[in-house]
Image (tube, rainbow, N blue to C red):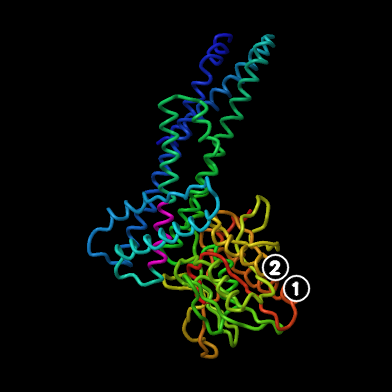
C-alpha cells in the first residue's frame, strides 16, 4: 500500500512540477522573468526528484523475478563425455550417481549444478 | 511565492522526515513479508523432511530468537579459545534442537535444516533491527535517527534478498556460490579414498607432479562448513610439521565492476567466520614455518548465498589448474601440500 502511495505521490509531484513549468513559461511570455526563473528552478528540481523516485521503485520491483531463477543439473559420462542437462530435483548433489550413459552404458555422475541466467530481452 | 519559500524553510524538514518515514515503513513491511516467507519455508521443509509428531512452530520461534554472547575482551589472552568453546557449545545445541524437531531427517537433511533455520534467524534479526530504528524515529520524530536507517536501506535490502535466495537453496539442497572452495577440493579428491577428520571434515590423498597433495573439505552433501582449522592442525601433526605449503581456496566478495568467477591469488588464511579457525591455521603455520597461499573466486554477496552460478561452477576447473601451477612452481618432488576447500558444502558430495 505504501509503495502505491509513494508512486501516487511521485506522479503528483511530477504533474505539479510540469504545471509549474508551464505557468513559468506563461509568465515569461508576459515579461515576468523573475517569476519564470523561480518556477523553472523549482519545477526542474521537482521533475528530477519525481523521475528519480519512480526509477528507483521500478528497479526494486524488477529484482524480484530474478530470485526465482531455474536451477539446472548437468550429468556427465566420464568415459565418452556424453552430457545430460535437466532441471534440478531435490536430492541431486555434485558427484552423485545419475544413472547409465545412453551411449556407452557407463555410470554417469552429476558434474555441475548451477542457476540458469534469465534470458536477456532482445532489442 | 514568498509564502511557499517560508513554508519550505520552516516545515521542509518535517516534510522530509515524513517522506523518509514513509520509505522506511514500506521497507519494514517488505522485510516483514520476507521474514514470514523464510519462516514458512523453514516450517514447510521441517514438516516434509523431519516429519515431527507435534507442531514444531513454538520450538522454531524459540530458535529464531536464539542469541550468542561473545566472551569478554578486556583480557584478550585466551579470547580465541573462549570464543571457540562458546561456538562449539552453540553448534552442538543447535544441531540437537534441529534433530529434536526433525526426528526423521538424516544427517545431510539435518545440516540443510540447520542452515535454513540460520537464514530465517538472520532475516528475523534484520527485520527486528530495521523495525526498531523505524519505530524509534517515528516516536522521536528525529531526523538523524531516521537518516541512519534510511542511508543503509539499499544495502539492507540487498542482504535480505540474498537471504531469500539462500533459504530456497538450503530448503532444496542446491549448491550455493560460497561452495566454490568445497567444489574445488571435491574435484581434487574425486575417485580417491576418503577419510573423516575431526568435526565434519573429509580428506583424501592424491599425487600431483610427484608431490603428495591432501585435499580437504567439509563433509557433504548436507550444508556444512566444518572446522578446517582443526583438520589442518591434525594433518600437520600427523606429518610432524613437514608440510611444504597450505593452499586455501574460498569465495570472496567482489567489488562493483569485477567479473563473477574471476580468480585472484594471495597470501594468508582465506577463511571467513568469527576468526577462530583462521587463528588456529595461522598458529600452526607460524609454529612450523609453513607458507599459506590463498586462491579466491570473486562473487557478490547475493551470488555467495544464492544457488551457484555457472561462472562460479566453471571457475572451479580453473582453480584446479591454478593450484597445480602453484604446487609445481613453489614446491619440489616429494613435498606434502594441503589444499583446503573452504565453504558451505551444501549440494556438493565428495
Residue shown at 42%/36% (left/top)?
B132
Q: Nearer the viewer, residue A45 or B115?
A: B115
In 3D space, how far apart are the residues under numbered discs 2 and 1 (Cα atoms)?
A: 10 Å
Drawn side of residue A41 relative to residue A55, left or right:
right
Residue bearing mark 2: B291
Reply yes or no: does residue B115 show up in magenta. Answer: yes
Q: Report the residue that reaches farthest toward the left.
A: B54
Q: Nearer the viewer, residue B192 or B23?
A: B192
Q: Is residue B21 above or below residue B253?
A: above
Q: Nearer the viewer, residue B232 or A75?
A: B232
Q: Position of residue B85 (x, y in %)?
A: 45, 59
Q: Nearer the viewer, mark 2 or mark 1?
A: 2
Verify CB contact (< 8 Å) between mark 2 and mark 1.
Answer: yes
Mark 1: secondary structure? helix
Q: Position of residue B27 (x, y in %)?
A: 45, 39
Circle 1 chain: B
Q: In the rendering, which numbered label is found on residue B330?
A: 1
Residue shown at 63%/24% (left/top)?
A44
Q: Position of residue A8 (x, y in %)?
A: 47, 31
Q: Report the residue that reaches farthest toward the right.
A: B329
- Crowding near pointer 2: few (<14 within 10 Å), some, many (20+)? some
Instruction: Return the disc, 2 or 1, that comes first in the chain's sequence.
Output: 2
Mark 2: secondary structure? loop
Drawn side of residue B283 relative to residue B20, left or right:
right
Q: In the rendering, which numbered label is found on residue B239?
A: none
Tell me where residue B8 sits by quadrant. top right
Prevailing secondary structure of the magenta residues: helix
- Crowding near pointer 1: few (<14 within 10 Å), some, many (20+)? few
The segment highlighted magenta reads B110-121
Amino acid at each position: 500500500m505504501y509503495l502505491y502511495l509513494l508512486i501516487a505521490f511521485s506522479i503528483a509531484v511530477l504533474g505539479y512540477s510540469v504545471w509549474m513549468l508551464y505557468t513559468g513559461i506563461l509568465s515569461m511570455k508576459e515579461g515576468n522573468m523573475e517569476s519564470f526563473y523561480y518556477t523553472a528552478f523549482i519545477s526542474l528540481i521537482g521533475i528530477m526528484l519525481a523521475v528519480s523516485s519512480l526509477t528507483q521503485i521500478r528497479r526494486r520491483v524488477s529484482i524480484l523475478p530474478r530470485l526465482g531463477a531455474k536451477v539446472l543439473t548437468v550429468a556427465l559420462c566420464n568415459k565418452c563425455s556424453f552430457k545430460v542437462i535437466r532441471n534440478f530435483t531435490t536430492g541431486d548433489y555434485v558427484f552423485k550417481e545419475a544413472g547409465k550413459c545412453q551411449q556407452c552404458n557407463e555410470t554417469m555422475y552429476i558434474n555441475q549444478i548451477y542457476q540458469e541466467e534469465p534470458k536477456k530481452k532482445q532489442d | 511565492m514568498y509564502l511557499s519559500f517560508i513554508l519550505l524553510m520552516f516545515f521542509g524538514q518535517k516534510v522530509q522526515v515524513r517522506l523518509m518515514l514513509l520509505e522506511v515503513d514500506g521497507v519494514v513491511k517488505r522485510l516483514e513479508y520476507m521474514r514470514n516467507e523464510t519462516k514458512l519455508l523453514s516450517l514447510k521443509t521441517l514438516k516434509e523432511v523431519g516429519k515431527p509428531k507435534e507442531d514444531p512452530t513454538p520450538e522454531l520461534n524459540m530458535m529464531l530468537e536464539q542469541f550468542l554472547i561473545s566472551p569478554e575482551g578486556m583480557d584478550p589472552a585466551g579470547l580465541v579459545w573462549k570464543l571457540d568453546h562458546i561456538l562449539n557449545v552453540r553448534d552442538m545445541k543447535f544441531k540437537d534442537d534441529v534433530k529434536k524437531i526433525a526426528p526423521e531427517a538424516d544427517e545431510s537433511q539435518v545440516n540443510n535444516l540447520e542452515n535454513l533455520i540460520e537464514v530465517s534467524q538472520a532475516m528475523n534479526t534484520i527485520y527486528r533491527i530495521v523495525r526498531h530504528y523505524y519505530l524509534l524515529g517515528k516516536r522521536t520524530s528525529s531526523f538523524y535517527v531516521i537518516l541512519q536507517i534510511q542511508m543503509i536501506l539499499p544495502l539492507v535490502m540487498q542482504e535480505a534478498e540474498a537471504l531469500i535466495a539462500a533459504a530456497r537453496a538450503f530448503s532444496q539442497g542446491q549448491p550455493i556460490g560460497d561452495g566454490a572452495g568445497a567444489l574445488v577440493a571435491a574435484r581434487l579428491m574425486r575417485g580417491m579414498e576418503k577419510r573423516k577428520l575431526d568435526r565434519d571434515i573429509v580428506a583424501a590423498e592424491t599425487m600431483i607432479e610427484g608431490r603428495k597433495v591432501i585435499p580437504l573439505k567439509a563433509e557433504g552433501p548436507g550444508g556444512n562448513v566444518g572446522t578446517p582449522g582443526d583438520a589442518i592442525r591434525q594433518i600437520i601433526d600427523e606429518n610432524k610439521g613437514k608440510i611444504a605449503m597450505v593452499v586455501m581456496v574460498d569465495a570472496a566478495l567482489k567489488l562493483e565492476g569485477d567479473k563473477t568467477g574471476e580468480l585472484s591469488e594471495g597470501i594468508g588464511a582465506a577463511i571467513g567466520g568469527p576468526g577462530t579457525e583462521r587463528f588456529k591455521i595461522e598458529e600452526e603455520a607460524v609454529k612450523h614455518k609453513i607458507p599459506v597461499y590463498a586462491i579466491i573466486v570473486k562473487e557478490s554477496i547475493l551470488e555467495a548465498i544464492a544457488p551457484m552460478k555457472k561462472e562460479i561452477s566453471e571457475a572451479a576447473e580453473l582453480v584446479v589448474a591454478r593450484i597445480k601451477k602453484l604446487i609445481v612452481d613453489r614446491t619440489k618432488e616429494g613435498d606434502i601440500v594441503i589444499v583446503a576447500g573452504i565453504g558451505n558444502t551444501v549440494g556438493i558430495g565428495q
